[in-house]
Amino acid sequence: MIMNTILIFTRNISIELFKLKRSFAFWLTIIGASFIPLIYFIYYALKYKSLIPADDVNPWDNFLTIQIMSAASLLIPLFIVLITSLIIQIEHKANAVKFVFTQPMPKWSIYFSKLLSVIGMIVFTYALFFMMMVISGKAAGTLHHELGLLSHSPNLSQPLKLLFRSFIASMGIVSIQFWISFRFKNFIVPLGIGIVLVITGLIVFQAEESVYFPYAYNRLSLFLLASEKGQMAWFPNISLFSLIYFIAFSILGYLDISKINIKY
């Protein structure tokens, strides 16, 4: 029984990932992951004279960190809102949500396989974003050797730590947006709610109460928090709060969706 349930669940995940590979959402992740690295490649290519580092400075530190800071503050939360809403909208447009919920399989398997496929797409975006940053740096260094990007090796600890913190900080947003996107057929509703909440997070993130507002976590994850005692940790308290939101809203979302009759 348990093995059969696991097989159904893994098969559902495989089906969801296969569908995403053939959708616009897949190409949107590639565009989203490449956008900032491309902008910074152009910037370094054109303004290289003012960006030549001192002899004792590793240019990769600034090149990678500034891109992550630029993306994680606003673009990553907005991208998560957009990609989550878009993926579920694809199901709504094809009437697939109504169809799959009539199939003889557990509703939890349907809901959580779709949720995990969304998370998988986001993980892919983070990985591609990191790869594109390194490629754009190598390309800029090849174009202008004075930048020192070829004569130095990137120190990956700090950028990987920032990306990991940003990813975990995004989990609360993912579960909330996934629920809202499943709940409303109209694409504008989850997208509009998400954009408003992301902008609100940017406004309130400096307030002490922002630790209870998951849409501010991505911004907070970029900075050294008071609880970290002078050294940036891989898993600060804000990450724990984000995972609590993720678990809570994933369960609440499933309980809500499993009880309603989705109408078309």
Image (cartoon, rainbow, N blue to C red):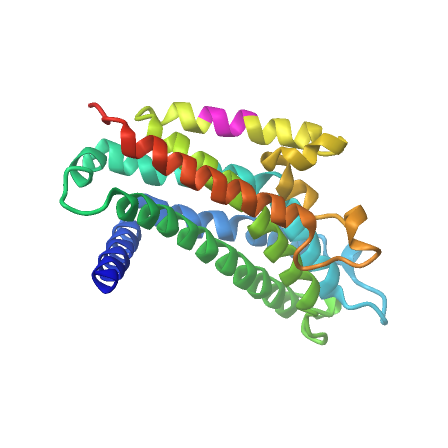
Camera-side residue of 204 and 11 = 11
Q: Quadrant of the N terminus?
A: bottom left
Camera-side residue of 124 and 164 = 164
Q: Quadrant of the C terminus?
A: top left
> Is residue 80 visible in this depiction of the protein?
no
Camera-side residue of 132 and 47 = 132
Q: Position of residue 134 (x, y in %)?
A: 59, 65
Q: Main secondary structure of the magenta part?
A: helix
Asked whether, in this view, residue 222 is left or right of residue 138, the answer is right
Q: Residue at x 34, y 25 (%)?
A: 184
| 55 in relation to 227, above or below | below
Q: Position of residue 72 (x, y in %)?
A: 61, 45
| 229 in relation to 131, above or below | above
Q: Residue at x 47, y 35 (%)?
A: 176
Reply yes or no: does residue 194 show up in magenta: yes
Reply yes or no: does residue 67 show up in magenta: no
Please report the bounds of the magenta region as a residue range.
Answer: 192-196
Asked whether, in this view, residue 242 is left or right of residue 121, the answer is right
Q: Position of residue 236 (x, y in %)?
A: 69, 52
> Is residue 55 visible in this depiction of the protein?
yes
- In the image as oriented, which residue stretches furthest toward the front? 1
Asked whether, in this view, residue 252 is left or right of residue 46, the answer is left
Occupied quadrant, residue 202:
top right
Q: Position of residue 33 (x, y in %)?
A: 50, 52
Q: Residue at x 56, y 60 (%)?
A: 130
Camera-side residue of 158 and 221 = 221
